Image (cartoon, coloured by chain):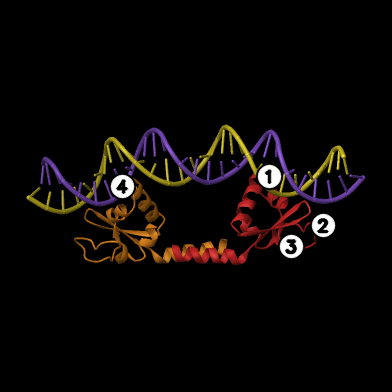
Chain colours: A red, B orange, C yellow, D purple
DNA sequence: TCGACATATCGAAAATTATCAATATATCTG
DNA sequence: CAGATATATTGATAATTTTCGATATGTCGA
């Protein structure tokens, strides 16, 4: 679900109060808001996804912005396609 | 791995002693041979895959032949592609 | 520099999944 | 029919994953 939301941030998240754009994706705390999972769980999810490169992380001060990394995702799907 | 093997049965399995073709896929016991998992585990795997339609089952006497169901697999990949 | 806020990390408990041995069922062969 | 062989089912245990609360770290602003 997180992954899908990040496809069109403007449809699923409010614009960030400081930054007025979604250029770097969505702030971790907004993502947390939309789930009913704990902060630590979401933080873990996002970190793992960033670690395996399907999300990119950009920090703006104390905020962490996560964005889909379409190339890697596309690649992942292709690899899957070739191995299934 | 099982899934991949079934892509080209002739490269991974001996032809069945009775049937001389792979038209209906590969016999469950041959699949078991190539893994070091128990009979019950493999039987379960194959049943589950058959239940969700990505494999088809054809019985010849006491043997169960499993074959990839390419349409469903293709469909699965497309769905995945659309949801990732 | 201190407190507030955002995120990350850690360790543990709960839930789920993988796997097996034992047993049941079904089919063939003599 | 009886034994042999192939597969399926069941119940249990081990391994892994999910998730959390507590705590740590980093950053901002007064």
Which disc, if any, is residue B39?
4
* Residues at discs 1 and 4 in contact (Cβ within 8 Å): no
- Which residue has dot 1 on it? A39
- What percent of the width, then of the height, locates residue B60? 23, 58
B44 vs D2, left or right, is right
- What percent of the width, then of the height, locates residue A60? 77, 56
- What percent of the width, then of the height, locates residue B75? 47, 65
Q: Are marks 4 and 3 on the same chain?
A: no
Q: Categorize mark 4 by other alpha carbons within 10 Å: few (<14), some (14-19), many (20+).
A: some
Residue in the image at 35% along x and 60% along y: B56
User: Quarter holding the C terminus of chain A?
Assistant: bottom left
**From mark 1 to mark 4, how far is it between C-alphas?**
43 Å
Which disc, if any, is residue A22?
3
**From mark 1 to mark 3, how far is it between C-alphas?**
21 Å
User: Residue C12, located in which quarter of the rendered image?
Assistant: top right
Can residue A1 be seen here? The reply is no
- Judging depth in this view, the residue of B56 and D5 nearest the camera is D5
Q: Is mark 4 on a helix, strand or loop?
A: helix
Q: What element carries label 2?
A: loop
A15 vs B35, left or right, is right
- Which residue has dot 2 on it? A18
- What percent of the width, then of the height, locates residue A28? 70, 52
Mark closest to the chain's N terminus, 1 or 3: 3
């Amino acid at each position: 679900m997180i992954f899908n939301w990040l496809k069109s941030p403007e449809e699923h998240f409010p614009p960030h109060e400081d930054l007025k754009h979604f250029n770097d994706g969505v702030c971790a705390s907004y993502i947390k808001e939309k789930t009913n999972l704990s902060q630590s769980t979401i933080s873990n999810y996002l970190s793992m996804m960033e670690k395996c490169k399907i999300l990119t992380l950009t920090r703006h001060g104390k905020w962490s912005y996560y964005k889909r990394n379409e190339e890697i995702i596309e690649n992942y799907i292709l690899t899957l396609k070739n191995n299934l």
